[in-house]
Amino acid sequence: MTAQELYQLLQTELPCDEAMAGDRLGVQVEPPALTISGILTCLEVTDAVLDEAERRGCNCIVTFHPLIFSPLESLRPFDRVGRCIMRAVTSRIAIVSVHTTLDAHPDGTNATLAQMLGIIPERPLLPSPHRRHGYGIGIVGRLAEAMPLEDLVRLVGERLGTTVRYCVGTRDTIERIALVAGSGASLLDAAIEAGADAFITADVKYHTFHRAAGHIALLDAGHFEMEQHVPQLLAQLIERLLERHGIRLGVTPSSVRTTPVHVEVPLTIEIERSTTS
């Protein structure tokens, strides 16, 4: 099986027309005459992930985040993207990206995250434009039992192992929730229109919190932390596909923690206000 044949198979579950506009999908690196002998799934390609692929004998990496997203102006060793591309070619490792097609899957990134957080899904936040049942971006759902906002913040932090930034909306008790794993702050208005008491996403800017405050509780749970389950999820999906088509290939989820972000213990400081003449 070639990398292109694998991606064609993936599209039977992850159709490319379900992706967000402008996404980068499919085969991104394919050394000449490469036949896949083993697959590694990951959140994103880094040097450590390439080390792991070589160590585990996997010559194809199926990544969630595209390695190549912006147009390349050069391939240089001091840049992560350029370095990883050159290394993949010289090590004869193919790279395939699925990104928001996995987000849009009925059992994909967001549905699995909702399950992890105890949210019962009702519908996608942005339903499929092609009317495929269950496909779409994000989740609108509810908790089995309503809880105070502070308890929800604590639950999200504990289950994802993250520090949660948040603002308060209109309700002290939360039941209906909108959820978008990763950078979903642009869907704030959709979450409000869906009647959600809280919106959980990541990469939220300061002024977006100001927009949300007093309208909807907005929680930023961290980009990596909201998507850290993806390698396992993606490996399971590929294994089912291969088995269904009678293809025998090993599929291994990456164990590399790829986030470059470190978080210190949060502190509250008092800012003394004074005037001088």
Image (cartoon, grey):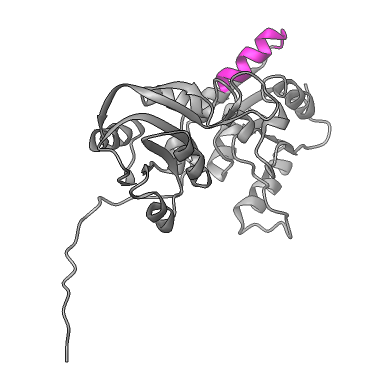
Nearer to the camera, 114 or 11: 114
Q: Is residue 239 magenta?
A: yes
Residue 127 location, quadrant: top right
Secondary structure mainly formed by the magenta segment: helix
Residue at horizontal 57 percent and vertical 27 percent from the top: 56
Residue 40 in the image: state x and y as whole percent: 60, 28
Residue 8 in the image: state x and y as whole percent: 77, 24
Residue at horizontal 37 percent and vertical 50 percent from the top: 262
Q: Tell whether 42 sits left or right of 132.
A: left
Bounds of the magenta span?
Answer: 235-247
Q: Tell whether 77 sits left or right of 186.
A: right
Task: Answer whether residue 57 is visible to the viewer in this image.
Answer: no
Residue 274 location, quadrant: bottom left
Residue at horizontal 19 percent and vertical 61 percent from the top: 269
Q: Residue 185, relative to residue 249: is it above or below? A: below
Residue 22 in the image: state x and y as whole percent: 69, 45
The N terminus appears in which quarter of the rendering? top right
Q: Residue furthest bottom?
A: 277
The C terminus appears in which quarter of the rendering? bottom left
Nearer to the camera, 42 or 138: 138
Number of numbered tags placed on the structure image: 0
Task: Answer whether residue 153 is visible to the viewer in this image.
Answer: yes
Nearer to the camera, 238 or 148: 148
Q: Tell whether 17 sits left or right of 274.
A: right
Q: Is residue 4 magenta?
A: no
Q: Residue furthest right?
A: 33
Residue 125 in the image: state x and y as whole percent: 53, 32
Q: Tell whether 259 sits left or right of 160.
A: right
